[in-house]
Amino acid sequence: MPALSGMKDICDYIHRSEATVLEWIRVRGLPATKLGGIWESDSDLIDQWKKEMILNDSDRKKRLGINDFGIVKPKKQ
């Protein structure tokens, strides 16, 4: 498990700003925590989290009848 130590390492790994990373930690459950005043995470955990987010979004789109372009498919009659 490659460790990511510090917010800069985490942001650099997922190519997002600090504000976005902090929001994702708080709202979406991005796997990171502050230990002794330093943000810590793990690239393997982040990769797994991203896969789960993609799968969950795909399932949600299927249930709602939304295609990959965000367009609601007409219901068959």
Image (cartoon, rainbow, N blue to C red):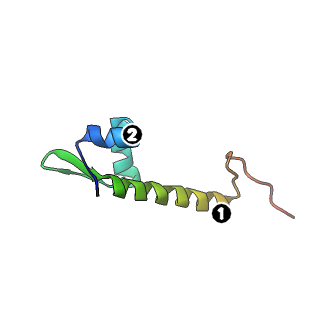
In the foreground, 55 or 71: 55
Q: Which mark is residue 16?
A: none
Q: Indicate the position of residue 29 as horizontal and vertical percent values.
A: 37, 55
Disc 1 or 2, which lies upstream in sequence?
2
Q: Amino acid at mark 1?
A: Arg
Number of numbered discs: 2
In the foreground, 74 or 67: 67
Quadrant that contains the N terminus: bottom left
Residue shown at 68%/45% (left/top)? 69
Quadrant that contains the C terminus: bottom right
Q: Amino acid at mark 2?
A: Thr
17 versus 50 height, above or below: above
Say which residue label 1 marks: 63
Q: Indicate the position of residue 14 as horizontal and vertical percent values.
A: 39, 43
Relative horizontal placement of residue 58, taking residue 13 as reference (left or right): right
Q: CA distance from mark 1 to mark 2?
A: 27 Å
Tag 2's secondary structure?
Answer: helix
Q: Indicate the position of residue 71 as horizontal and vertical percent values.
A: 72, 47
In the foreground, 49 or 61: 49
Residue shown at 35%/58% (left/top)? 45
Residue shown at 41%/54% (left/top)? 47
In the foreground, 30 or 9: 9
The residue carrying pointer 2 sits among few (fewer than 14), some (14 to 19) or many (20 or more) residues within 10 Å by Cα, namely few
Say which residue label 2 marks: 20
| Residue found at the very far front of the displayed protein | 2
Residue shown at 66%/61% (left/top)? 62
Tag 1's secondary structure?
Answer: helix
Which quadrant of the structure image shows residue 55?
bottom right
Relative horizontal placement of residue 66, taking residue 20 as reference (left or right): right
